Amino acid sequence: MDLTGIGKRIRAQRERLGMTREEFAEKLDITPKFCSDIELGVKGMSVNTLCNISNVLLLSTDYILFGTETDSVENTISVLLRECPPSKLDNLENIIKAYLSAINS
């Protein structure tokens, strides 16, 4: 098992979501040091911790373990959408449409 690759994928998603290591560790109910060890590939994790990481980061366990790019982008976007205040969703939709229109021109 490639612990370094697993750690890199976990850290990249955590950072994409704007979560500090301390916040992430708290959500997982682990120490920041253990979180660091996982991200650096120094230590592995239990199945329970893997499932918790999957839930917190909205990544599939397959992606975390093997790097298969199934739905990590969609999950990141879903998280960002959930953080958007409901009163601003129309604005966000217009921004996305304008962006897609500009890059497809």
Image: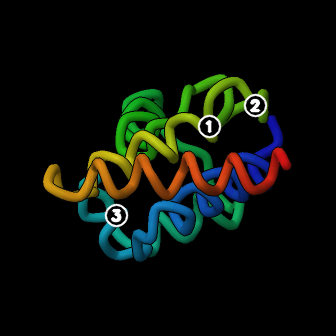
Q: Label 2, label 1: how many angstroms apart (C-alpha)?
A: 6 Å
> Residue 91 appears in which quarter of the rendering?
bottom left
Q: Label 2 neighbourhood size at 10 Å, few (<14), some (14-19), many (20+)?
A: few
- Image coords of residue 66 (percent x, y): 77, 30
* Residue shown at 58% from the left, 55% from the top: 13
Q: Upstream in the sequence, badge 3 or badge 2? A: 3
Judge depth for marks 3 and 2 and give the one in front: 2
Q: For the residue marked with disc 2, what is the amino acid?
A: Glu
Q: Is residue 58 left or right of residue 68?
A: left
Pointer 1 and pointer 3: residues touching (CB < 8 Å)? no
Judge depth for marks 1 and 3 and give the one in front: 1
Q: Is residue 32 left or right of residue 9?
A: left
- Image coords of residue 98 (percent x, y): 59, 54
Q: Label 1 neighbourhood size at 10 Å, few (<14), some (14-19), many (20+)?
A: some
Pointer 2 and pointer 1: residues touching (CB < 8 Å)? yes
> Residue 37 appears in which quarter of the rendering?
bottom right
Q: For the residue marked with disc 3, what is the amino acid?
A: Ala
- In this rendered view, identify the residue nearer to me: 80 or 90: 90
Query: In the current view of this chain or complex, which residue is farthest to the front?
Result: 105
Considering the numbered disc 1 on the image, is that residue within a helix, a strand or a loop? helix
Q: Label 1, label 3: how many angstroms apart (C-alpha)?
A: 20 Å
Q: Label 3, label 2: how many angstroms apart (C-alpha)?
A: 24 Å
Q: Upstream in the sequence, badge 1 or badge 3? A: 3
Q: Which residue is mark 3?
A: 25
**How many discs appear?**
3
Considering the numbered disc 3 on the image, is that residue within a helix, a strand or a loop? helix
- In this rendered view, identify the residue nearer to me: 36 or 68: 68
On residue 72, the disc is 1
Q: Is residue 33 left or right of residue 23?
A: right
- In this rendered view, identify the residue nearer to me: 76 or 51: 76
* Residue shown at 54% from the left, 51% from the top: 96
On residue 69, the disc is 2
